[in-house]
Amino acid sequence: MSLCKDLPEPLHLMVMKVQQDATIAVAATAPHTRDLIRKVGRPTAMKLVCAVLKMASLSMNLSQPITPYQVFELAQLFLDKYPTDSVMDLIMCLKLLKSGSLCNEDGEVVRVYNRFDVQTVMEWMAAYGLQKAQWLEEQHRREAGAHKEAAKGLFLNADQLTDEAREVVEAVKAKLIRPTPPLETFTDVDYFATLEAQLPRMPEAPMRALLAEARRKGDRIVEQMVEDEIQSRRTTYSEVAPL
């Protein structure tokens, strides 16, 4: 609770540096809060969130700043409500808010109105969630377009190939553009078991195609399985800062 009252200068400077480098792209690849809690423990995760909230409150120069008890309560609520978001998402939300770049679902800029409490921070996070979702959707469209163009380029000179080489190219082509299995089969227990066994060995491009199809069809089970595998790979093979 002491951290909610007074923010040590070294921690203040650290949060400022992280905020300076924050982007939605960085936030989207940062460890989820549930993974952060598993790695460093809930008390340490609470300290990080409290530091971010306390610094944001101080930087806004409000006439009624958030109280230490509100900081503590909000930190608990954030960790419980956003297990698949990151502390960096909270930092990015507050950064966009302070820069006048945070918009609601109607496209209107979100204003502070001299309030910084549990309810308003939850409203800011909801608006940020919409912006992040739009950014992610744009990234998916770009990736899909890039894969499509790459596939086109693979077959520009197919007529000049020998019969043997053409057979190889067609086999690769079929593998690249093979459609995702029908989502109706996702209710089959055997399918889930097979998918769980294949995901660790699945290349990234087919895995992201499977994720996009699951999101399009609203299949939350498959979507969560693929997201967990992607996050597991990031955690295993990437050197990511705790935030």
Image (cartoon, rainbow, N blue to C red):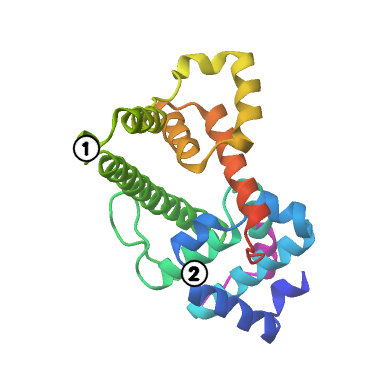
Residue 109 position, x and y percent, is 32, 62
Along the line of sight, the residue nearer the viewer: 207 or 86: 207
Quadrant in which the C terminus appears = bottom right
State the residue at coordinates (34%, 58%).
103
Quadrant in which the N terminus appears = bottom right
Residue 29 position, x and y percent, is 54, 56
Label annotation for residue 68: none
| Number of marks in the rendered image | 2
Q: Can residue 75 be seen here?
A: yes
Label annotation for residue 160: 1
Residue at the disc numbered 2:
22
Horizontal side of 58 relative to 135 (left or right) equals: right
| Contact check, label 2 and label 1, Cβ < 8 Å | no
Residue 14 position, x and y percent, is 63, 79
Which residue type carries mark 2?
Answer: Ala
Residue farthest bottom in this picture: 9
Instruction: Examine the structure image and report whether residue 106 is included in the region drawn in magenta.
Output: no
The image quarter containing residue 172 is top left
State the residue at coordinates (28%, 54%).
107
* Residue count near mark 2 (Cα–Cα under 10 Å), binned few <14, some 14–19, many ≥20: some
> Which segment did they paint magenta?
63-73
* Image: 101 above or below 61: above
Q: Closer to the observer: label 2 or label 1?
A: 1
The mark that comes first in sequence, 2 or 1, is 2
Instruction: Examine the structure image and report whether residue 71 is included in the region drawn in magenta.
Output: yes
Compute the Cα span from label 2 to label 1: 49 Å
Circle 1: element type: helix
State the residue at coordinates (61%, 36%).
201
The image quarter containing residue 155 is top left
Horizontal side of 154 relative to 11 (left or right) equals: left
